[in-house]
Image (spheres, rainbow, N blue to C red):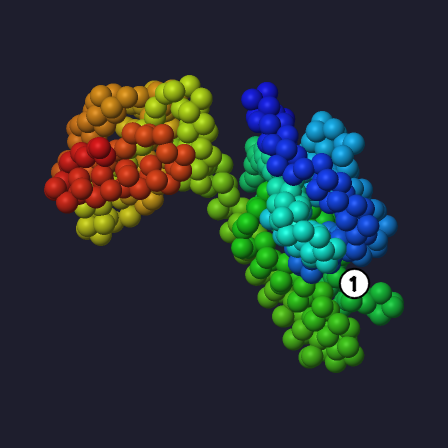
Amino acid sequence: MLSPIQDSEVHGDWHECLGRAGPATRRWVTTIVDAGAEQVSDRFYAAMLADPRAGAMLDHEVVNRRLHGSMVRWLRQLFDPASTPEQVFAVQRKTGEVHARIGVSIELLARGAREVKRALTLRLAAAGGPPQRLAEAIAYVYELIDLALGLMGESYAQNADRQTRADEAYRLFFLSQDLAAERERQRSRLLEWAHQILVRNYWEAPSGNESVGSAGSEFSLWLEHKAAILFDGAPEIGQIRANIATVDGELLPRLARARAEPDAARAVVAEINQRIGEVKALLAAVFDRFIDHEDGRDGVTPRLLSRRYFPSVAKREIGYAQAHASRFALLLFDIDAFDALRESLGAAAGDAVLAAVGDVLADHVRAGDFVFRLADDQFLVLLVDVDEAGLAAVADALRRRIERLPPRAGPFPSAPVTVCVGGALFDGHPDYQRLLERAKAALRRAQLAGVNRLDLAG
């Protein structure tokens, strides 16, 4: 919902739009809209259906049966002089909510709106009349549709944001489960499916049910309906699907044709087993990676957040700072000569240094601050509710604490571990990437000055 101030602004914009077009012009536009609403609706949905992103959701039957009529009613109500602002606003907000729910983007709606404005402009021009009235009518049409689209966009964004939060909560529910146990369950289901297809397509006598593939198997159902949530964006899921599709679509039909020829059949079975082995390896890899990383942590610095959570945290802190007139800051830490250290002492020493630096940062920030592993040897601290003096004090204290890390047994280096630090205080700009770039620039200045140095953005 809009705030009372925003709602008042929309009402003001609405009445200004009506005031800029005289009553005669508005009545003329209403007549043109009423006469051409059916054809304009056709043009709107032709543009929408031409886009593959909308075509899958807006098939022709649905458009002809329901949405076409809804579009006609929307046009007529928007330009009906008897419509109150409250009625018009309610329709736009509901429209935005529905489109967010079904996944038709506001970008597509804007594209369709351009078609509507173009179509109405052509109809107004074809109707003739004084040039001044035509210009006034076209401006009125464009402004009123833009106002409606703006209300849709507000509602769309609010509902899309709620859906995103719900999706993430649902995904986090899966991540909170015992992923190691889930990995073994799905591995067992994969092997069960592999055994069933070989029994039914190779070992048993032909029964007319050959080439029974993955459809309906426990593993396939999990892959299509839950793995997509759990491993959103993971490339391994697409690769697993491709391997299973090859088994279903190519290898099982070949096996059915080769059953009477043992040597040929064994060759196909070997190919099937190879594909299933690849699926097993991909499944293990994606589970291992998500067990280690997708809960926001990694095996070397398990107390720290991974960089994937930084945008969400930063955007929230920007909103908080703007709402409460407070400030926050970023500190970037880069371990001096880390590549040389790892090359000379080995990976175990490198991991020990990373873990030690991560522990210092985690142990010596406040409960409300955030610590991220940003890159291999780079850490990021987000300090909340801090001013310029506090930023400088915390940055220097953390730098000194890392410098005082005691030598450890084993491969840990005996020489002091040092870091260069760059920091930047939030200056009101709403783009978190700009703040991060300022901190990176400060870090580069510190590194150019030598080792164990600190620089803060002005």
Task: Estimate the x, y position of residue 313 in percent, counting from the top left.
Answer: 44, 31
Q: Residue at x 41, y 29 (%)?
A: 318
Looking at the picture, tell me which residue is in the foreground, 100 or 343.
Answer: 100
Judge from the rendering whether residue 202 lies leftward or rightward of residue 275; answer left or right: right
> Would you name the residue on which mark 1 appears?
212
Which quadrant is home to the N terminus? top right
Which quadrant is home to the C terminus? top left
Q: Classify 58 as above or below 147.
A: below
Q: Residues within 10 Å of mark 1 (few under 14, many from 20)?
A: some
Q: Residue at x 34, y 26 (%)?
A: 328
Looking at the picture, tell me which residue is in the foreground, 87 or 340.
Answer: 87
Q: Quadrant of residue 274?
A: bottom right
Q: Residue at x 75, y 61 (%)?
A: 213
Looking at the picture, tell me which residue is in the foreground, 207 or 416.
Answer: 416
SS of the residue at dot 1? loop
Judge from the rendering whether residue 173 lies leftward or rightward of residue 374; answer left or right: right
The three-letter code of the residue at mark 1 reads Val
For this orientation, the residue located farthest to the front is 130
Task: Estimate the x, y position of residue 142 in percent, counting from the top left.
Answer: 63, 45
Judge from the rendering whether residue 327 lies leftward or rightward of residue 248; answer left or right: left
Does the rendering let one see residue 77? Answer: yes
Q: Quadrant of residue 257?
A: bottom right
Judge from the rendering whether residue 422 lies leftward or rightward of residue 249; answer left or right: left
Q: Residue at x 32, y 30 (%)?
A: 427
Task: Estimate the x, y position of residue 195 in percent, counting from the top left.
Answer: 71, 58
Q: Classify 236 as above or below 140.
A: below
